[in-house]
Image (cartoon, rainbow, N blue to C red):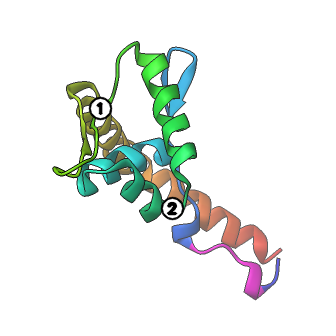
Amino acid sequence: MTETTRLKRDQIKLRLKLKIGDDAIGPGKASLLKNIRKHGSISAAARDMGINYRRAWFLLETINTALGQPVVKTEKGGKAGGGATLTAAGTAIIDAFDACSRAADASTEDLLAGLHQSLATTNKE
């Protein structure tokens, strides 16, 4: 490994997924839910993430199917403008995902730092 390809410490991370039924909720689906909460709109959330509206709906449907209940409540457009809000289930998913992510990051920080150090040491061989 050359100097230019050496991994930086922040490039070694643990990636978390919550397995729910036959589906998993990872950083992408969690980000979609957070962006819907932030923007109040599925289309705005999708734009913010650089995905299309159809893909966003597909991801939401996979979560809904896994949970057996909707994670987003939508209102039709018109004069009021419509929009989307998270259901209690959607909020619970985000809260659990974020709490698990924080706990995993905190509990693996030293282990991942050790891995980085080991990789840096083996790079010199």
Magenta-drawn segment: 3-8
Q: Which residue is mark 2?
A: 113
Count of number-bearing discs: 2
Q: Is residue 84 magenta?
A: no
The residue lying at 27 percent from left, 25 percent from top is 89
Q: Tag 1: residue type?
A: Gly
The residue lying at 33 percent from left, 54 percent from top is 35
Q: Is residue 7 magenta?
A: yes
Query: Which of labels 1 and 2 is toward the front?
Result: 1
- Gap in angstroms between the C-alphas marked 1 and 2: 33 Å
Percent across and percent down for residue 112 are 52, 55
Q: Which residue is mark 1?
A: 90
Picture quarter containing residue 125?
bottom right
Percent across and percent down for residue 86 are 25, 36
Q: Is residue 49 left or right of residue 74?
A: right
Percent across and percent down for residue 91 are 24, 35
The residue lying at 59 percent from left, 75 percent from top is 8
Percent across and percent down for residue 23 are 55, 23
Residue 15 seen from this side:
no
Q: Is residue 73 left or right of residue 60?
A: left
Q: Tag 2: residue type?
A: Ala
Q: Residues within 10 Å of mark 1 (few under 14, many from 20)?
A: many
Q: Residue furthest left?
A: 80
